[in-house]
Amino acid sequence: MGKGVLDVAYIEKREAKNGPVRYRALIRLKGHPPQSATFGRKTDAKKWVQQTEAAIREGRYFKSAVAKRHTGEELIDRYVQEILPRKPKSISSQYQQLMWWRGQLGSRSLADITPQFVVQCRSKLGNEPVRGGVRGPGTINRYMAVLSHVFTVAIREWGWLEDNPIRKITRLKEPRGRVRFLSDDERKRLLDACRESRSPFLYPAVVVALSTGMRKNEVLGLRWKCVDLARRVMVIDETKNDERRAIPLAGLALREIGRLAEERDPDCPFVFPSKGGAAPVDIRTPWETALRRAQIEDFRFHDLRHSTASYLAMNGASLAEIAEVLGHKTLQMVKRYAHLSDQHTAKIVASMNQKIFGDDKT
């Protein structure tokens, strides 16, 4: 404890009439505001003085004090107001996730949001019933990722915390990527059902998705300024990976986009517009109706992308080529299609052996 004129730490005993004995600890260190706390036991007061004085001298105490002044609600609210608008492509999904966390963190101080508490919240997240069952490991990991970024911003930009509790928590193991693709018969039934839909945009949207492997938001958000029919290409500026991507147009997809171009409203920027043309069309209900009519089960719009990749693999495309078409930065995401190209790979190896060794049948 400090013993100088300017550096002082002491414990004062206080006795109230007909009340318990209390011990008030006080710390005064040069260059820092005084700190005090009251305890029921002198040993607790001594321990607090020792730990707090050491934390102050090492520059740790006031960071912790800041964390105690702010709550989880404040943390989420500030992030939503200041940071989330910088992430336009993530606003919809992450706002929902952040509001869930806001409800869990509530008025709890940031100093009390420990890894153990977050794990408890994560367990609750995984057990909550949602449409279609419960949240899977992948979804839970995304909830954890957005909260981790909230803490990172609070540390680096706001000075509210000195450590991120999420970094001490192990990610949940996610199952191997789903590969659900349309069989030839399913594809025919689905396209027939989409062609008969009341929505004039369902059929061409599904054709484009199957032909190109584009994501749903990329297809429906497609603008005419991105389409070059003369060069038979679409150029997408706002992709999931924030990279500009050129997507070839061919066959039926080219013909369908060409047809829509002839019928388009020149004042509407969207290839697949909603009524009025102010936003992309919503095909959720027509899509679900088409699936029922085609008697196709366990299939999502995103599985059209898997179908494209699977067809590419079965037609001899390499993993690198599939990744290029789908717009993946690495091969990791397309390794799930490797087994579909085994036969093609075997042919390549056999061809190479034939060329270097000749027709050796021994």
Image (cartoon, rainbow, N blue to C red):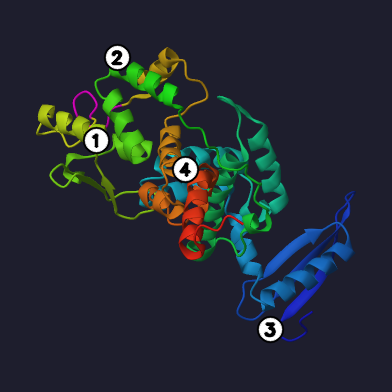
Q: Give me the residue at 52% from left, 37% from top.
A: 179
Label 4 sits on residue: 94
Which image quarter holds the C terminus? bottom right
Label 1 sits on residue: 251
Q: Which element type, helix, strand or loop, lies under badge 2?
A: loop
Q: Is residue 269 magenta?
A: no
Q: Earlier in the sequence, mark 1 or mark 4?
A: 4
Label 2 sits on residue: 196
Q: Nearer the viewer, mark 3 or mark 1?
A: 1
Mark 4 is on which residue type?
Gln
Mark 1 is on which residue type?
Gly
Which image quarter holds the N terminus? bottom right
Q: Nearer the viewer, mark 1 or mark 4?
A: 1
Q: Earlier in the sequence, mark 4 or mark 2?
A: 4
User: Percent from the top left, x then y, of residue 211?
Assistant: 32, 36
Q: Which element type, helix, strand or loop, lies under badge 4?
A: helix
Q: Nearer the viewer, mark 3 or mark 4?
A: 4
Region rendered in magenta = 273-281
Which class describes the residues within 10 Å of circle 1: few (<14), some (14-19), or many (20+)? Answer: few
Q: For the residues marked 3 and 1, what is the alpha-carbon distance in whole angstroms?
A: 84 Å
Q: For the residues marked 1 and 4, what is the alpha-carbon distance in whole angstroms?
A: 37 Å
User: Percent from the top left, x then y, of residue 245?
Assistant: 30, 52
Q: Is residue 12 visible?
A: no
Q: For the residues marked 3 and 4, what is the alpha-carbon distance in whole angstroms?
A: 50 Å
Which class describes the residues within 10 Å of circle 3: few (<14), some (14-19), or many (20+)? Answer: few
Q: For the residues marked 4 and 2, what is the alpha-carbon distance in whole angstroms?
A: 36 Å
Q: Which mark is residue 6?
A: 3
